[in-house]
Image (cartoon, rainbow, N blue to C red):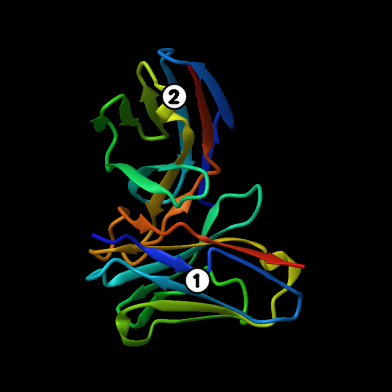
Amino acid sequence: EAGVTQFPSHSVIEKGQTVTLRCDPISGHDNLYWYRRVMGKEIKFLLHFVKESKQDESGMPNNRFLAERTGGTYSTLKVQPAELEDSGVYFCASSQGTGTGKQFFGPGTRLTVL
Amino acid sequence: EDQVTQSPEALRLQEGESSSLNCSYTVSGLRGLFWYRQDPGKGPEFLFTLYSAGEEKEKERLKATLTKKESFLHITAPKPEDSATYLCAVQAGQTGANNLFFGTGTRLTVIP
């Protein structure tokens, strides 16, 4: 069974540019989560989709971040315009049941904003 | 405010030297406590779920325990392949809150 995949693995952009991260969850997993780890800090929740609906977006830092999950399959996280403090590793996770803490994580996308 | 604190930050053990990692938490309405393992360049990998004080779970050389204030991850006779960062996370609050709240992790190195 294929795991959660994320693309790209690394991205280096200039401040003010736009970047789009993609996550493909495990097939059949209705729940998809985005998390972020800023250097030296803990992994922090950004948002949660159930199928194509946003269940919880309380962790999104500001309106420069836009997440979508069209058709309830893959998801994208767009940062526009990127700021220096957006640098970090962005993880996507998926789970079968809503409410479970047993989540399957992708390898992450390392974003560097210069 | 919900808080998850892990200690120590880093731990070096000789192969076969048993030890414990600590995760203390202050949350409103614990729904579950989770242990994950993370290898360099990879995402966290699920290990255990604990729901109530007194509960224990075991897997190979790892055993997780839970009290009302903290959880321990006991590592018995570790091997070099156990080297990784171990993350503790909680789910708390109202039923709709499904996200995980992580600690900063303990980086374990097991020396042959």
Point 52% across, 49% down: residue: B41
Q: Quadrant of residue A74?
A: bottom left
Residue A109: image location, x then y, percent: 54, 63
* Residue at mark 1: chain: A
Secondary structure of residue under mark 2: helix
Residue A45: image location, x then y, percent: 49, 62
What amino acid does circle 1 point to?
Ser
Q: Quadrant of residue B33?
A: top left
In the image, is residue A2 above or below residue B82? below
Label 1 Cα neighbours within 10 Å, binned few <14 / some 14-19 / many ≥20: few
How many numbered marks appear? 2
Are discs 2 and 1 located on one and the same chain? no
Question: Is label 2 in contact with label 1 (beta carbons under 8 Å)?
Answer: no
Secondary structure of residue under mark 1: loop
* Residue at mark 2: chain: B
**Drawn side of residue A47 relative to residue A13, left or right:** left
What amino acid does circle 2 point to?
Pro
Q: Nearer the viewer, mark 2 or mark 1?
A: 2
Quadrant of the rendering where the C terminus of chain A is positioned: bottom right
Q: Which mark is residue A58?
A: 1
In the image, is residue A93 above or below residue A75? above
Q: Nearer the viewer, residue B4 or A41?
A: A41
Identify the residue position indicated by label 2 in the image.
B80
Between marks 2 and 1, how big is the CA–CA gap?
39 Å
Label 2 Cα neighbours within 10 Å, binned few <14 / some 14-19 / many ≥20: some
